[in-house]
Structure formats: structure tokens, C-alpha cells
Amino acid sequence: MISCQKEDDLFEAEDQIQERVDTGLKVSKETIEKIKALSLNPEGMEVIYLEDLNGNENEVYLIEGDIVISPGQLETLSQDDITSKQYRTTNLVNNNRTIKILGINGGSQALTSKQRTALQNAVADYNSLDIGLSFTLTFGTNTTSQDIVVRQLQGAAGGVAGFPSNGNPYNSIVVYSGLESYSNAVNEHVMKHEIGHTLGLRHTDWFSRQSCGGSGESSAPYGAVHIPGTPTGYDSSSLMLACFNSYESGNFGSYDIVALEYLYPLPSFSVNISGPTRGNNSGTYTWNANVQNGNGPYTYSWYYSYTGTSYTQSFGSTQSVTANLPLDRDLYLKVIVTSSSGTDSDTFFTMNTDAF
């Protein structure tokens, strides 16, 4: 089993990290209580130096093996900020937006070919979900205007990331060079897992670290909000388990998908009619049914009325309809659009100026 580092390499890697820890930042009793209050598991928590994109090393807390929280972030988070995803945090990314991801492909922090492929597959799978977030992926070294930067540092197999803040994803994912000796599927698993953290997902077994060989008994039974439709106990298929194995498939667990769709729902399917608001007896006019946030194909049913109270007369079955206005009368239109996303309708009024 692996928890950001391969298990049998973990102690050696931790010893190397500990030599670089500045004694000014320590895991104090007060710090542990703050971590517990956030419903995070403080077992094995440590202070590490994490190199940033500029090569500067910053002190951070490493929690549950791959979650990094800075001292400043720890002070600003409250118990209300961390709940559960199936388990998740309530520090979520603003929904209905595009997340720009950059994979570093030059310099000392460049991703390997295998890691780049894994990142491409991970982003493609996130984009295949029916959620309100979409993702773009580019490779380069210019980090300007990027939401998440993915890079490699030297270390045992695994990676680290953090939680969102101010409606934005955590802006950095580090994967370690030891991943190169593992399969493409394991690399993809780690990429998806760390992206999950940047979106506010936490370890599904945060309470016990059962995937790492824990007893399965909760070590910090602080309140956590359960996501409807997901298990309340251990989910062995979850991509967000604290530890993973060398035979991981790289796929989302079914309940991971349920949780992501719950946290980041698609915008509501809707339709609105556009067209002329005024016309006359001699003109020919076109009205369009404009669909937002739906998945086609669509079925269109148009109806018209002279009074706006009873739409019983069929008017067409395509996205756009073209016609004359009724002689010396106003026109009221209604369209009903149906697809796999649901059904919605809209009405529209066009005044006939020759009716006066």
C-alpha cells in the first residue's frame, strides 16, 4: 500500500525530510487540537519544507500523508470549513467554471512522459463527469493565469496537494519521482487523487486510515457531514482513500462520482425563446429556442396562442420556426424542449403593430 510514498520507502523519505525541518514550526498540542477540530486525522502529522515553483522552500504541515496546509491556512480555517466528502471539505471551488491546469515540462521540476500521460488521462476523466466544472490542460513553464500547476520533485512514490481557498482550487500539485517505477494506472490514480484534494475532496477513510492498515476504528470522531448516496463507512473502491496499492486501476470509484456530482452539480437545464418582439402583417419572422446546460439530442415542440392562456395549436418541431404573424393579431408562442437532461419550456410574445 502507498500513501504518497511507497510504504517500504516511507520511513527513509521521512527521515530525509525531517533533517530539513525548521524548528520554528512544530506540531504542538495546540496544533493537533486544531487539526482534530477540522475533522482531519493528526496521526503521523509532521512539518516539512515544500519547494515552490521558484525553488524556495516553505514550511507546511503534512497531514494524512499528502495534504499540505500552511500555518496561515490553518489559522483561517474553521470547523465549519472542513466537513466531509464522502468525505470533503466545505472549502470548495466556485462551481460552473473552467479550471486551467498546467503541467510543467521544462526545468528541474518537469513531469516525465509517463506523468504527463497520466495527467492527460486524469483531466480527460474529470471532464467526462457530469459536473459543473470543466478542465483545460496545457504543458509548459509559464504559470501565469494557471489555476493548478502540476510538477515533479525528487522523492518516493506519491504526491501532495492542498485544499481550496477563496473559491479557487489549491494551486499546486507535487508528484514525486518515485512514481516513475510504477504503472501508468498508478500514476493516473495519484494525479486524480491530488486533483481531488485541490477541489476540496478529502480522504474517504480520514477517520481511520483503514486503507493504510488501520484498525477501522475512528481516531477522531468529530462531526462530519455525510453526502447523500454515498457510504457512511469504509469504501474500498474509492479513489480518495489515504493509501493505495501498486495495482490500482486509476478509475474513479462509483461513489466518488456520486460525491463529485453532488458537490459540483451541472447548472440547471433551461430554454429561452429569442425573436422579434414587434412585427406586422407583411413581415416574415424567425424565433429560436436557445438551450443552456443540456445534453442533446433535443426534441422541440412549439405551440401558439392568440390570448396567451391556452397553447393548443402546434407551430413546429425544430429549434427555429419561421412564419408570418396572424392577420391583425398578436402572437403568443410556447416551446417545450426535452432531452436526457430533462424538460423545460418558455413562452414569448410578439406584438402585431397592424392590430391597432
Image (cartoon, rainbow, N blue to C red):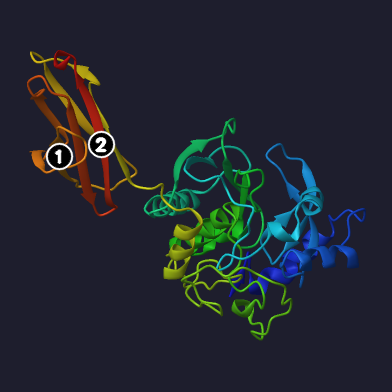
Tag count in the figure? 2
Q: Residue at x 67, y 46 (%)?
A: 165
Q: Residues within 10 Å of mark 1 (few under 14, many from 20)?
A: many
Q: Nearer the viewer, residue 323 or 130?
A: 323
Q: Comparing marks 1 and 2, which lies closer to the viewer?
A: 2
Q: Quadrant of residue 6?
A: bottom right
Indicate left or right for 282 with 42 as reference. left
| Residue 307 position within the rendered picture, expressed as x and y whole percent measured from the top left | 18, 34
The amino acid sitting under disc 2 is Thr
Secondary structure under badge 2? strand
Q: Residue at x 44, y 60 (%)?
A: 184
The amino acid sitting under disc 1 is Trp
Instruction: Classify 301 as above or below 15.
Output: above
Residue designated by label 2: 347
Q: Nearer the viewer, residue 192 or 345?
A: 345
Label 2 near label 1: C-beta < 8 Å?
no
Q: Residue at x 11, y 22 (%)?
A: 325
Instruction: Classify 3 as above or below 136.
Output: below
Q: Quadrant of residue 234?
A: bottom right
Q: Earlier in the sequence, mark 1 or mark 2?
A: 1
Quarter of the figure that contains the C terminus: top left
Residue designated by label 1: 302
| Residue 111 position within the rendered picture, expressed as x and y whole percent measured from the top left | 54, 47
Residue 130 is at least partly visible in this image = yes
Mark on residue 316? Answer: none
Residue 250 is at least partly visible in this image = no
Label 1, label 2: how many angstroms apart (C-alpha)?
10 Å
